[in-house]
Image (cartoon, rainbow, N blue to C red):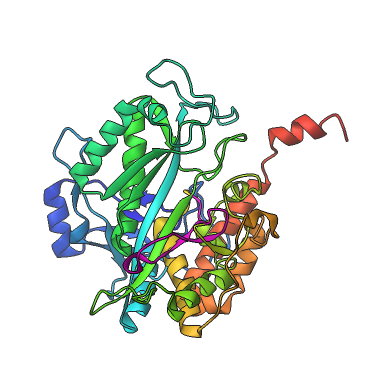
Amino acid sequence: MVPDLNGIARGKILPDDKFLLGLKTQGMRLPEAIFVQTVTGDYPANEDVTDPATIDVYLVPDPKTIRVVPWYQEPTAQVICDTVYADNSPVQISPRHVLRQVLALYEERGWRPIVAPELEFFLVKINEDPDYPLEPPMGRSGRPETGRQAYGIDAVNEFDPIFEEVYDFCDAMELDVDTLSHEAGAAQIEINFDHGDALELADQVLLFKRTVREAALRHKVYATFMAKPMQFEPGSAMHLHQSVVDRETGKNLFAHEDGSDTPLFLSFIAGLQKFVPAAMPLFAPNVNSYRRLDPKSDAPINVHWGRDNRTTGFRVPVSHPEARRVENRIAGADANPYLMIAGSLACGYLGMVQGLEPSSPVTGSAKRLAFTLPRHLYDSLNKFSSSRPLRSVFGEKFMDAVWFVKLAEYDAYQRVISSWERENLLLNV
């Protein structure tokens, strides 16, 4: 498997003997163009960041990612791959390489980021007609959930057969999932991952999304990671807890021994504040993503930060010095985990190396303050493409690839006439 720009797993299925032969002969290849494939399966008409001959790239399996596929009856393994060209140079627009590139910047300074994602998703009734709104599924009681049951134990128990299978699958694959809880939406669930290495956690999120979809389908239910799948329900987020430790000692560089914040920590927050709005295509990559950023919902609308304040874009939980961290609450569940983690760490890195200072922490609700995040994908892409600091971290080729792919998706969306337009404009204007 290779994750593309949208976080979709691309790849090949083959017998184990052919896989082993391919390791020796560079026989495992995919077209370079998979990295500029849109979410609709199309390709940008004017992209020029891949070879016009649609050359092949070579798959290099990462041995640390080999895991069983627990839902297959025949013994089957899955492995996530890096990609290289014929001269063994990395494919710069591969999301896994993009994250590795950011981690290398930390390594050069003797730093190591530690992350812990939190991923929300909805279970929904199988929807065969995309024009028809989604609905919550039937639980064990035989009734769909209608009210919001945040942290409700009995509400989660409605779907015990699905989640028992999810946990069994995760155990078999050694995915480090931790807490499961019911979120505010009808049949909306959150899973937390234990903290650890950024690349390993991105791999785990990729595999977890496949796992939940599979477990749900086995019970005739959809699991969706859309940022805003239903009109009257909250959106789904992918929050990211982040800290930075010394590579040699493992000491958390975000807090002094007395518990006070270090200048490095404050600069990391300042970097998030300054650069996240420009990096929004990595946190809110789809046209639907921006529907989640609603002042009336739990999602943030600006880049303020606060201590134990869930209304801000960046929250500092109460913790001991060794666990000092900041939670980026802006990304949607639809984000590519590799690019979301790379984007957040890159923004924090820029703040640290530039010695930036954050604004004062917000007390009370940050929702009373101005909406300063981009409101739609096109605005977001323009800010992203014109950001020189982000280009210095990610490189021209990757920045251009995101621009071309996401602009093509936006253009495709703009050609669609919605039911709202037909209902309210057809006979009234």
Is 56 on the left or on the right of 66, as rendered?
A: right
Q: Main SS of the magenta segment? A: loop
The picture places residue 398, in percent across and down from the top left corner, at 47, 69
Who is closer to the viewer here, 153 or 52?
Answer: 153
**Which residue is at the front of the view, 11 or 25?**
11
> Which residue occupies the foreground of this view, 260 or 370?
260
Which image quarter: residue 179?
Answer: top left
From which residue to which does the magenta span run? Answer: 309-332
Q: Residue at x 62, y 35 (%)?
A: 231
81 up-or-down from 156: above or below: below
Q: Residue furthest front?
A: 258
Q: Is residue 423 at least partly visible in the picture?
A: yes
Q: Quadrant of residue 31?
A: bottom left
Residue 310 falls inside the magenta stretch: yes
Q: How many marks?
A: 0
Q: Position of residue 214 (x, y in %)?
A: 33, 35
- The residue located at (60%, 58%) in the rendering is 407
Residue found at the far right of this picture: 429
Q: Does the magenta segment cover residue 157? A: no
The residue drawn where x is 31% and y is 58% is 195
Question: Above or below — where is 248 with respect to 368?
Answer: below
